[in-house]
Amino acid sequence: MNIFSKFTSRMSPITKRRWNGFFRQKRAWIGLLGFISILFFSMTAEIWSNSKPLILKREGHWYFPALISYPATDFGITDSFVVDYREMAKKEKEEGKSTWALFPVNQWDPLEQSPDVMSPPSKTHWIGTDSLGRDVTARLLYGLRVSLSYGLMFWAMCFLIGVTIGSIQGYFAGNVDFFTERVKELIEILPFLSVVILVNGLMKSDSFWITLGVVVAFSWSGVASQLRAQFLSLRKLEFCDAARAAGAGHARIIFKHILPNSLTPILTLTPFTVSGGIATLAVLDYLGFGLSPPTPSLGELLQQGRTYIQNAVWLLITPTVALSWMLISINLIGESLREAFDPRK
């Protein structure tokens, strides 16, 4: 039994047919391979790009600085809180000590500045450096992780709020539905960018969580509207009446009977919600209203690329290609899900 047979073995015939239809599409595989590759390399960025060695053997002891933080005193350093592992390994080798270090393939940290400001691609800096001498390869790799983490958390929070509110709206209807719709209308007419700027100004901070919270506050209503429509159409059907007649409470009817039958359109929205969150963060960072520096960010690299396009074109090309690759992969998955789960087929 292959992996897909195991994945679909406990599903209903309709759901199994839909997933089989998804995996038969070439664009689904292209999207999955693209997304998984980005997810893998970005979430394991410390292994591929770091100024700290993956493995360090010194004076008979083994260390793993890329994964574990060690105090400087462990290496006999008393005049600094930061350990320059490259310099330490080089110096101790010159002194004849048996120090051995295995560094990542790209020996740069995303926040580390070098004297090579605006340096073009080279053996030292594969995709060049930015206006502060930071390695673009490292910032791109870690920036992809920030973008993916943001997109996935944006999706999770939007769906948690949207599914909860949409379910309550659609099930109870009446005054609950009326007042909730007015709140959603208010959210939709407020100028999103102005509110982001205002909140960041008042909080004196533009951190990851504040930016995420503000964006989610303006984005959950679409998911809620989808669930509301599903609940309004299902709450009067026979299986709900039968559950009420059997003595089932509201919570059981919502979570056991209606919600499982309402998730198909939500599933097809998932990839587009993730890509929407990633694109929104890139736009906010590009405009200067997103994450606080020096956080690695694709939008910040794009902004630098626009500013220095005549002198450092690599600052514009590389984040553009990376962002496009990520969004296209996610949207291919979304299009494939929409095709496979289309109720008209």
Image (spheres, rainbow, N blue to C red):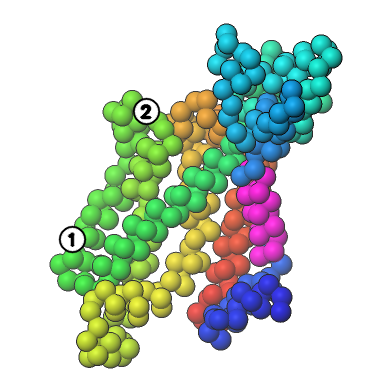
Q: Position of residue 270 (x, y in %)?
A: 49, 61
Closer to us: 246 or 27: 246
With respect to residue 2, does 320 lie above or below?
Answer: above
* Mark 2: amino acid: Ser
The rendered magenta stretch, by its main secondary structure, is classed as helix
Quarter of the image where one finds residue 141: top right
Q: Are marks 1 and 2 in contact (CB under 8 Å)?
A: no
Residue 21 visible? The answer is: no
Q: Which residues are magenta?
A: 28-42
In percent of the image, x 48 and y 40: which residue is there?
A: 281
Q: For the residues marked 1 and 2, what is the alpha-carbon distance in whole angstroms?
A: 33 Å
Q: Quadrant of the C terminus?
A: bottom right
The mark that comes first in sequence, 1 or 2, is: 1
Against 180, is 312 above or below? above
Instruction: Look at label 1 and name its amino acid.
Output: Phe
Identify the image quadrant of the N terminus: bottom right
Residue drawn at x 17%, y 71% is 174
Q: Can you tell which of label 1 and label 2 is closer to the viewer?
A: 2
**To which residue does mark 1 refer?**
179
Visible residue check, residue 104: yes
State the residue in front, 146 or 269: 146
Q: Residue at x 61, y 21 (%)?
A: 74
Q: Residues within 10 Å of mark 1 (few under 14, many from 20)?
A: few
Above or below for 128 versus 161: above
Q: Secondary structure at mark 1?
A: helix
Q: Position of residue 57 (x, y in %)?
A: 75, 28
Q: Quadrant of residue 194?
A: top left
Give the numbered dot on residue 205: 2
Residue 36 on the magenta segment: yes
